[in-house]
Amino acid sequence: MKIISSIEELRDQMRGQLRTSFVPTMGNLHEGHLSLMRLARKHGDPVVASIFVNRLQFGPNEDFDKYPRTFQADVEKLEKEGVYVLFAPTERDLYPEPQEFRVRPPDDLGNTLEGEFRPGFFTGVTTVVLKLFSCVQPRVAVFGKKDYQQLMIVRNMSKQFALPTEIIAAETFRAADGLALSSRNAYLSPEERIEAPVLYQTLNEVADEVRSGHLDIWELERKAMAKLADRLWKPDYISIRRRSDLQPPSAGDIANKEPLVVLAAAKLGVTRLIDNLEI
Ligand code: PAF
């Protein structure tokens, strides 16, 4: 595997490659990321991964400085997956001057759910993803459904800018007890790790209620938030949305069995976890 940090060198290396499959990451790789690499391999060749902890998508009080950085272990894992190039730019490589041009997602998609609780987050994500796409020039790129809203925003960006990159969605990789794998799980204490699967269990309970015909989604959301709060979680949201545009469904949407997704974000101790489940 070639490890490349400069954009110029990456361009030289990738010249003439027409079927590149790309997986952008912020490192601290776990099985979930490796499943993205395997899916990428099915959709193209060569596979390029990137590791870049993108300052633009972290708020001033978020965990940019303490975000886990495990570069050597990540390299070994990517080598085993047969990744062809690891693009690992430094901040100076990717942002040699202040990144003043930004890509701002539309308000209805970018300022709801995660966007409401993490202002500027999606602008940081789309800006770096567009820049990484411009460096790697992939034919396909793989994003996990764990970050459901991110996946939808990147997909819409790619479509609206007519980028030549198809966005592939990968299913969420879960531990045996249901907890979605995430780099931030590393912050959980042993007791919190035992409690953490309750988030996914709660999503399943909400989904079951909707499937069995419960129409009052506001009441379902309220009950689910109260359950987490009783267990000492601090929920930001549990929200049932239309899969198509992540807007709240109308009564008619629910009656007509419009495809839905329930999304959640909640803090357990100092760790903020997100998850979702398609209904
Ligand atoms: O999902 C992530 O790890 C990041 O948001 C991404 C897509 C690599 C952009 O920094």
Image (cartoon, rainbow, N blue to C red):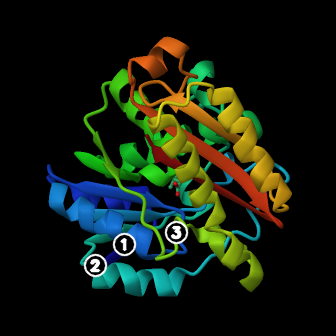
Marks 2,1: beta carbons within 8 A: yes
Point out which mark residue 246 bears.
none
For the residues marked 3 and 2, what is the alpha-carbon distance in whole angstroms?
18 Å
Whether tag 3 and tag 1 are in contact, CB under 8 A, the answer is no
Residue at image position (58%, 22%) is 248
Residue labelled with disc 1? 34
Q: Are marks 3 and 2 in contact (CB under 8 Å)?
A: no
Q: Position of residue 236 (x, y in %)?
A: 76, 44
Q: Nearer the viewer, residue 256 or 129?
A: 256
Q: Quadrant of residue 155?
A: top left
Q: Is mark 3 within 8 Å of ligand 1?
A: no
Residue that badge 2 annotates: 81
**Which quarter of the rendered picture does the N terminus lie within?**
bottom left
**Which three-letter amino acid code belongs to the residue tagged 2?**
Glu
Question: Which of the pair 155/9 is nearer the observer?
Answer: 155
Q: Nearer the viewer, residue 13 or 188?
A: 188
Pointer 3 residue? 181
Distance of mark 2 from mark 1, alpha carbons?
A: 7 Å
Q: Residue 167 in the image: state x and y as whole percent.
A: 31, 42
Q: Residue at x 53, y 52 (%)?
A: 204
Label 3 SS: loop
Q: Quadrant of the C terminus?
A: top left
**Position of residue 137 in the picture relative to residue 192 (left or right):** left
Q: Earlier in the sequence, mark 2 or mark 1?
A: 1
Element type where label 2 sits in the image: loop
**Which residue is at a point 64% across and 58% down the rendered structure image?**
199
Measured as percent of width and height from the top left, residue 182 is found at 56, 67
